[in-house]
Image (spheres, coloured by chain):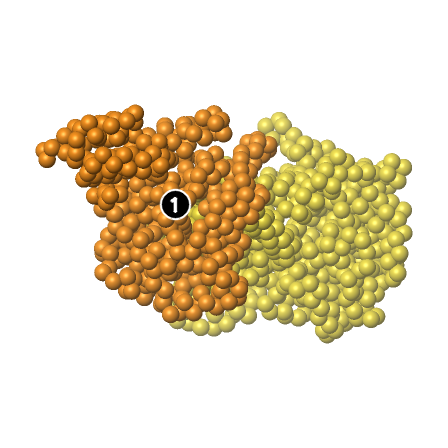
Chain colours: A yellow, B orange
C-alpha cells in the first residue's frame, strides 16, 4: 500500500501548501471568534411582547376604564405609574389605528409601556390587587420583602401581577425567556424560546449553510484542479510508469481531494464544538459526527468533478460540470418539493374528513371545504366564500375548527380563519354554516371567539367551542345572525370588522396558551385540555357550566395533540410518544413510540372510544384498539403519504392519501369499502411518472442536511412557515436514510465510471 | 554534474536488498538473465480521433526490434514518428492495437516490469508544491520505497544529478534544466534495472549534457539497460551501442552506430611520399577531390573509392609503385548524415507520407548539426 499511502500523504502536503487553505482557515477562525461573542441567558419569563397581548384594544379600553374607577384596582395603579408622554402616544396610536390596515402598533406601544413597569418596586399595592386571584408563584414572591427581591424576581412578580389582572387580554408568561447578548451586551428583546432549542437550531443552520454550502462550494472550486492536473500529459506519464493501478490511483487522488475538505470541515465543526462547549457549557458530540457527513456531501459533488476532470482534463470544465450537476439536483428537489408539492398538491390535499350522512366532506390544507360529487366523480368546493382570493395556495389555511356535522340539522359547522389583515381588530369570528338541503351553500351564523380551535357537542347536542379564553357553549340558534351593516365614511365595512353577536356563553374561564390542544368527548361531553405542561379534564355540571375534574402535570412536554372518547385518552407529544390515559383517573395505561422522534399530527377517536387512529407527521397511520391496548401500523395502502383521517362510525375509517384520494375501510379487517379520487390532471401525471422517478434515481446531496438536523437537534420533521410548535400544523417529515442511500449509490456509480475510464483510456 | 569518482558508491550499483528483491522477482517469473530487455514484434498502434472517434491515426505500423540487457539503445526519428507512443506502450500507458511487446520479459504495463524501470518522460512536470527531497519521497513511495529508504538514497541520488545543494528548495524556483535533472533523479532513485529516458538532456546546458553522457556510460558499466530517445544525434552517437530509426511508425534502420554511419562508397584521406607520376599512375581513373603538398613535401590527397575492394586495390597499386603511405584515413558519415540520408531514401522510395515534413526540415531546424569529421584517424600501417 506504500504507493497509495504516498499519494494520500502527498494530497495533504499539497493541501497544506495551498494558500487558499490557509486563507479559508483564517476566515473560519475569524468566524468562530465572532460567534464566540454570543451569549445566552435564561431568565424567569417577565417581559411583554406584542404577541403576549391577546386583545390590545380591549386591554387599552379596560385600563382606561379602570383608571377612571373610584375604587382601587390594578388598572388604576398601573395607569397611575404610566408617564403622561406615553399616555399621549397611546391615545395618538389609537386615533391613528382606525386608518391603519396592517400591523398593530397599539400592541407594540402597550407592551413597551408594560415592560417599563416591570422594574418598579412600587407597582404592587395590596389594596389594588385585593380582588385579583394570584397564582402561587406570585404569592410566594409577595411573601418576600420587595426590597429583598432581585431584579429578575421583581420583574417576574410584576409580570405575574399584571397578567393576573387582565387574564383575557394578556397571555400567561412563559416560565423562562431567553436573553441573547454579545460580549455582555443584551441584544433586542428576550426570545420566548429555550436556550437549548436556539443553540441547536443555530448550529444546524450554521453547519448546513457555512460548511454544507459555502464550505462545499469553496472545496469544489479549490480541489477541481487536482484530477485534471494529475491526468495531464507530463504528469500522468510519470505516475503510470510507477507500479500502481490506474483505478486505485484515481480513487486515491479522489480521496486526496477530500483531504482538503476534511481539513476545512474539521476546523469549522470542531471549532464550533469547542466554542459552544466553552462558551455555553453544552457539549454536542453530534457536531463532530457531522464532519464525516459533510465530507460525504462533498464527496458526492467531488466525484462528479473528478469524473469530468479525468475526461476533459480541464479545471474550468470540471467546475462548470459540477455546478450544473448541483443545479440539476437542486432544481429537481425544488420542482418536486417546493413547487409541485408545496404550491399545487399540499394545499388541496384533504386533511379533515367528515362523513355527513351519505356525503363525504373534506377540508383541505388551504381552507377549502369540498364534497365528493359521486355523479361527476370529483371533489367539488362547497361553502365557497364570496371573496375568495384568486391565488389559491395562500388562501387562509386549514380551518381553525371543524368542520363538524350536525346530524339533526343536516348542517356543517366550521370556523374558518379570519382574513389576516383584520384578525387583530376583532376577537370574534362568525361561524360558517352550510345545510345539505341548500346544497351546502355558505351562510354565516353567530360568532365564536376568533381563537377557537376545537368544536364538539355536549350531551344535549349543543355546540361546544374551546378557545384560548375558555370553553364556550352554544346558547342560541347558530344561524340566528343579526347583523346590521356598519359603515365608516359612507363605506360599508368588510364582514371581518362586523362579526355579529356572539351566540355562545362562556361556561369555563381559563387562559390557554398556544399551542394548546383540546378534545370534546362525544360520549359524555367532557373536554380534555392540554396546556402548558398540564393535562386536565373539564366536566359539565347540571347547570351546564364546566369544572375541572382532573388535572395532571406533565413537565417537559412542550406541545401535544389529544383525543378523548369513552374512558380513554390518547396524548401524542412532540417527542413522538403516544400516551394512553384512563379518562377516569388519568392513570397511565401505556406509552408507545411508533416511529422514533416523529410526532403525531392528528389523533382521532371512534365515537364509542374503542378505537383511535394516530396520524404521524411522516404520513404513517397507526391504529390503537382500546380492548387490546395495542398500537399497530394500519395495513392499508398509501402509508407514508397519508394526509387526513377520520372515523365515519365505530367501524368505518376514512383515510386521505395522494393528492385527492380518500378511501373508506371497514374495521377491524381494513377491507376497502370505497375509494374516491379525482382523475389525475397532467401535473399529477407528470409528477407521478417523471418527477418522482427522476428524483428517486438522482442523488440528493443537499438533503443530507436532514441527517445533520437529526444528529444535532434530534429533529425528524420540519415545520414549513410555522413559528409556533403547534403539532397540528403541517410538518415535513425529514427523510434520513433515503438521501444517504441514493447518494451512496450515486457516489459508487460515478467513481466506478471514473475507474473504468481511467483503466481503459490511453493517456 | 559532479560525478563521484567511484561507481561502487553510487546507487546505480544495486544494493544487496535490491539484488535479493530482483532475484526473487526473477525467480517468480522464471526469466533467464539473457532475456532481451525489450522485445517489440510487429507492433501496431492505431489511435481513434476526430468527431465520434471516427478517424484512425496509425502511430505504429508494425515495429520490430530488440534491446539486449546491458546495452544503451537509442531510438531516433522525426517528430510524430511514433517514438513516445512506443515507449508508452512498453510502460502500459498506452495500449497496443496489435503485435507483441515485452519489457524485461513481461507484458507491457505489467506492474512487476514497471517496478524495475526508471522512466523520465519528455516534458514531465513535477508538482509545484514539492522540494527536491519531498518530490523524491513522493516518487520513491510510488515506486514502493519506504520513507527510510528514500531518506537514505535521496542525498546521493541528488548528488549524482548535481542537485545536492537544492534538496530543500521548492521546484517552483528550478530552471528547466534543473527540473530535468530532478526528473532523472526520480528515475534513478529506486535503483531500476532499466532506464527509459525520453529527451533526457532537453534544457540541460552543454556541461550538464556531458555529465549526463558520463552517467549513462557508468550506468551501462553497472549493468543497466538504457533506452534512450533523444533528438541530440551527437549524444546518441557518442553513447549508444545500437540505434533504431523510426519514421512514420516503421523502423527504417536498426543496428550498431558504426554500421549505420559506414557507407560502401566513401573517400580516403592519404598522405603519400613518393614520385608524383607513380602516385598519379596508381590512382589511375579514380576521382581526386584534393591534391596538395605539405611542408614536408608529402602529397596530401582525398580520393574517392567505390568500396573496400577498390580501396584495397588503390593501396596495393601505391605500394607496388613504391609510394609510402605516411597516413591513411577513411571518411565516415556522421550519425546525422546517416539519419538524414536514410530518411531521404525512404522519402524517395515513396514510403513516407507526403503530409509529413521532410527529415531535412525536421532535423535541420530542431537540432544542432554535427560537423563531418574523420574517424579512425591514425597512421596507417602498410
Q: Would you name the residue on which mark 1 appears?
A: B256
Quadrant of image for the C terminus of chain B: top left
The residue lying at 24 percent from left, 52 percent from top is B1
Say whether residue B283 is visible: yes
- At 63% from the left and 55% from the top, the residue drawn is A741
Please indicate whether residue B169 sits to the left or right of residue A428 in the image. Answer: left
* Residue that sits furthest to the left in the current view: B295
Judged left or right of residue A700, residue A349 is right
Give percent across and percent down for residue A452. 68, 51
- Dot 1 crowding, Cα within 10 Å, few <14, some 14–19, many 20+: some
Q: Nearer the viewer, residue A659 or A1?
A: A1
Q: Position of residue A726 (x, y in %)?
A: 63, 55
Q: Depth check: A609 or B376 in front?
A: B376
Seen from the viewer's position, the closer of residues A219 and A652 is A219
| Residue at image location 65% in from the left, 30% down from the top | A492
**Residue A509 seen anywhere in this rendered image of the structure:** no
**In the shown orientation, is residue B276 left or right of residue B198?**
left
The total of numbered circles placed on residues is: 1
Task: Residue B73 in the image: state x and y as whole percent.
Answer: 39, 48
Q: Residue at x 51, y 42 (%)?
A: B63
The chain to which mark 1 is attached is B
Give whichever of A572, A636 is nearer the camera: A636
Secondary structure category for the residue under label 1: strand
x, y percentage for residue A109?
47, 46
Amino acid at each position: 500500500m506504500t504507493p497509495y499511502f504516498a499519494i494520500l500523504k502527498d494530497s495533504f502536503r499539497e493541501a497544506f501548501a495551498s494558500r487558499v487553505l490557509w486563507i479559508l482557515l483564517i476566515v473560519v477562525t475569524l468566524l468562530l471568534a465572532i460567534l464566540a461573542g454570543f451569549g445566552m441567558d435564561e431568565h424567569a419569563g417577565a417581559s411583554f411582547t406584542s404577541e403576549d397581548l391577546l386583545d390590545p384594544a380591549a386591554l387599552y379600553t379596560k385600563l382606561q376604564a379602570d383608571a377612571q374607577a373610584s375604587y382601587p384596582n390594578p388598572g388604576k395603579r398601573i395607569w397611575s405609574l404610566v408617564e403622561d408622554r406615553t399616555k399621549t402616544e397611546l391615545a395618538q396610536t389609537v386615533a391613528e389605528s382606525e386608518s391603519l390596515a396592517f400591523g398593530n402598533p397599539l400592541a407594540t406601544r402597550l407592551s413597551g409601556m408594560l415592560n417599563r413597569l416591570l422594574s418598579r418596586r412600587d407597582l404592587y399595592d395590596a389594596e389594588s390587587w385585593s380582588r385579583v386571584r394570584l397564582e402561587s408563584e406570585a404569592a410566594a414572591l409577595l411573601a418576600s420583602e420587595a426590597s429583598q427581591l432581585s431584579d429578575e424576581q421583581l420583574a417576574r412578580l410584576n409580570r405575574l401581577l399584571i397578567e393576573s389582572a387582565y387574564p383575557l387580554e394578556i397571555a400567561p408568561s412563559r416560565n423562562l425567556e431567553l436573553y441573547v447578548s454579545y460580549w455582555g451586551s443584551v441584544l433586542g428583546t428576550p426570545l420566548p424560546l429555550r436556550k437549548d432549542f436556539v443553540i441547536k437550531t443555530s448550529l444546524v443552520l450554521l453547519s448546513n449553510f457555512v460548511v454544507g454550502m459555502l464550505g462545499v462550494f469553496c472545496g469544489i472550486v479549490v480541489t477541481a484542479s487536482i484530477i485534471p492536473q494529475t491526468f495531464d500529459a507530463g504528469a500522468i506519464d510519470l505516475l503510470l510508469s510507477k507500479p500502481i493501478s490506474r483505478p486505485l490511483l484515481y480513487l486515491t487522488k479522489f480521496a486526496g481531494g477530500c483531504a482538503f475538505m476534511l481539513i476545512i470541515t474539521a476546523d469549522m465543526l470542531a471549532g464550533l464544538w469547542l466554542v459552544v462547549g466553552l462558551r455555553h457549557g453544552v457539549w454536542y458530540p453530534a457536531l463532530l459526527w457531522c464532519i464525516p457527513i459533510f465530507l460525504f456531501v462533498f464527496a458526492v459533488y467531488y466525484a462528479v468533478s473528478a469524473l469530468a476532470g479525468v475526461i476533459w482534463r480541464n479545471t474550468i470544465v470540471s467546475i462548470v460540470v459540477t455546478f450544473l450537476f448541483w443545479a440539476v439536483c437542486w432544481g429537481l428537489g425544488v420542482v418536486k418539493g417546493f413547487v409541485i408539492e408545496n404550491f399545487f398538491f399540499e394545499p388541496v390535499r384533504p386533511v379533515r374528513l367528515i362523513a355527513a350522512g351519505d356525503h363525504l366532506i373534506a377540508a383541505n390544507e388551504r381552507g377549502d371545504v369540498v364534497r365528493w360529487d359521486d355523479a361527476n366523480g370529483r371533489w367539488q368546493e362547497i361553502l365557497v366564500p364570496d371573496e375568495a382570493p384568486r391565488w389559491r395556495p395562500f388562501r387562509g389555511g386549514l380551518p381553525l375548527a371543524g368542520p363538524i356535522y350536525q346530524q339533526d340539522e343536516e348542517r356543517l359547522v366550521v370556523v374558518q380563519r379570519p382574513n389576516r389583515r383584520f384578525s387583530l381588530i376583532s376577537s370574534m369570528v362568525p361561524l360558517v354554516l352550510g345545510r345539505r338541503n341548500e346544497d351546502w351553500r355558505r351562510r354565516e351564523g353567530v360568532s365564536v371567539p376568533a381563537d377557537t380551535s376545537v368544536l364538539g357537542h355536549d350531551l344535549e347536542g349543543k355546540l361546544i367551542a374551546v378557545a384560548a379564553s375558555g370553553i364556550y357553549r352554544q346558547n342560541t340558534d347558530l344561524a340566528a345572525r343579526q347583523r346590521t351593516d356598519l359603515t365608516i365614511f359612507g363605506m360599508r365595512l368588510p364582514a371581518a370588522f362586523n362579526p355579529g353577536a356572539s351566540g355562545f356563553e362562556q361556561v369555563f374561564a381559563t387562559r390557554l396558551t398556544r399551542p394548546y390542544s383540546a378534545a370534546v368527548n362525544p360520549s359524555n361531553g367532557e373536554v380534555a385540555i392540554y396546556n402548558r405542561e398540564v393535562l386536565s379534564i373539564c366536566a359539565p355540571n347540571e347547570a351546564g357550566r364546566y369544572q375541572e375534574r382532573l388535572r395532571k402535570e406533565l413537565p417537559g412536554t412542550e406541545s401535544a395533540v389529544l383525543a378523548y372518547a369513552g374512558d380513554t385518552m390518547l396524548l401524542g407529544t412532540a417527542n413522538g410518544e403516544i400516551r394512553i390515559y384512563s379518562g377516569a383517573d388519568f392513570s397511565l395505561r401505556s406509552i408507545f413510540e411508533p416511529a422514533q422522534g416523529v410526532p403525531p399530527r392528528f389523533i382521532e377517536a371512534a365515537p364509542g372510544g374503542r378505537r383511535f387512529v394516530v396520524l404521524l407527521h411522516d404520513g404513517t397511520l397507526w391504529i390503537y384498539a382500546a380492548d387490546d391496548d395495542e398500537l399497530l401500523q394500519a395495513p392499508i395502502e398509501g402509508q407514508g403519504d397519508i394526509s387526513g383521517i377520520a372515523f365515519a362510525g365505530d367501524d368505518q375509517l376514512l383515510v386521505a392519501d395522494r393528492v385527492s384520494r380518500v378511501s373508506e375501510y371497514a374495521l377491524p379487517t381494513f377491507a376497502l369499502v370505497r375509494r374516491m379520487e379525482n382523475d389525475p390532471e397532467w401535473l399529477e401525471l407528470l409528477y407521478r411518472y417523471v418527477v418522482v422517478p427522476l428524483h428517486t434515481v438522482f442523488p440528493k446531496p443537499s438533503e443530507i442536511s436532514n441527517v445533520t438536523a437529526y444528529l444535532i437537534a434530534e429533529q425528524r420533521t420540519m415545520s414549513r412557515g410555522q413559528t409556533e410548535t403547534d403539532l397540528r400544523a403541517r410538518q415535513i417529515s425529514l427523510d434520513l436514510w433515503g438521501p444517504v442511500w441514493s447518494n451512496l449509490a450515486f457516489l459508487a456509480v460515478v467513481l466506478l465510471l471514473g475507474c473504468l475510464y481511467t483503466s481503459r483510456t490511453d493517456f | 554534474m559532479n560525478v563521484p569518482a567511484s561507481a561502487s558508491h553510487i546507487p546505480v550499483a544495486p544494493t544487496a536488498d535490491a539484488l535479493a528483491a530482483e532475484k526473487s522477482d526473477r525467480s517468480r517469473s522464471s526469466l533467464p538473465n539473457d532475456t532481451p530487455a525489450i522485445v517489440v514484434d510487429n507492433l501496431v498502434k492505431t489511435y481513434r480521433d476526430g468527431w465520434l472517434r471516427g478517424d484512425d491515426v496509425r502511430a505504429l505500423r508494425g515495429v520490430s526490434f530488440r534491446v539486449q540487457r546491458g546495452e544503451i539503445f537509442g531510438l531516433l526519428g522525426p517528430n510524430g514518428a511514433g517514438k513516445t507512443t512506443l515507449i508508452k506502450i512498453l510502460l502500459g500507458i498506452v495500449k497496443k492495437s496489435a503485435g507483441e511487446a515485452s519489457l524485461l520479459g513481461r507484458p507491457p504495463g505489467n506492474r512487476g516490469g514497471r517496478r524495475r524501470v526508471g522512466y523520465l518522460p519528455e516534458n514531465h512536470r513535477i508538482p509545484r508544491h514539492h522540494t527536491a527531497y519531498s518530490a523524491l519521497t513522493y516518487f520513491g513511495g510510488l515506486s514502493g520505497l519506504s520513507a527510510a529508504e528514500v531518506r537514505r538514497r535521496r542525498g546521493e541520488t541528488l548528488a549524482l544529478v548535481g542537485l545536492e545543494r537544492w534538496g530543500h528548495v521548492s521546484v517552483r524556483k528550478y530552471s528547466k534544466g534543473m527540473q530535468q535533472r530532478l526528473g532523472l533523479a526520480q528515475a534513478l532513485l529506486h535503483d531500476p534495472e532499466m532506464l527509459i529516458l525520453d529527451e533526457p538532456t532537453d534544457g540541460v546546458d552543454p556541461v550538464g549534457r556531458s555529465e549526463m553522457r558520463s552517467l549513462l556510460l557508468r550506468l551501462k558499466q553497472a549493468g543497466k539497460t538504457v533506452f534512450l530517445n533523444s533528438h541530440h544525434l551527437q549524444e546518441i552517437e557518442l553513447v549508444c551501442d545500437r540505434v533504431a530509426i523510426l519514421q512514420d511508425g516503421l523502423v527504417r534502420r536498426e543496428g550498431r552506430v558504426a554500421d549505420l554511419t559506414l557507407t560502401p562508397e566513401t573517400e580516403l584521406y592519404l598522405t603519400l611520399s613518393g614520385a608524383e607520376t607513380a602516385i598519379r599512375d596508381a590512382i589511375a581513373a579514380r576521382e581526386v577531390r584534393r591534391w596538395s603538398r605539405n611542408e614536408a613535401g608529402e602529397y596530401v590527397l582525398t580520393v574517392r573509392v567505390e568500396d573496400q575492394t577498390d580501396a584495397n586495390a588503390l593501396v596495393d597499386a601505391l605500394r607496388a609503385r613504391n609510394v609510402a603511405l605516411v597516413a591513411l584515413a577513411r571518411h565516415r558519415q556522421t550519425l546525422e548524415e546517416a539519419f538524414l540520408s536514410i530518411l531521404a531514401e525512404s522519402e524517395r522510395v515513396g514510403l513516407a507520407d507526403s503530409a509529413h515534413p521532410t527529415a531535412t526540415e525536421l532535423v535541420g531546424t530542431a537540432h544542432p548539426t554535427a560537423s563531418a569529421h574523420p574517424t579512425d584517424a591514425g597512421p596507417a600501417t602498410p
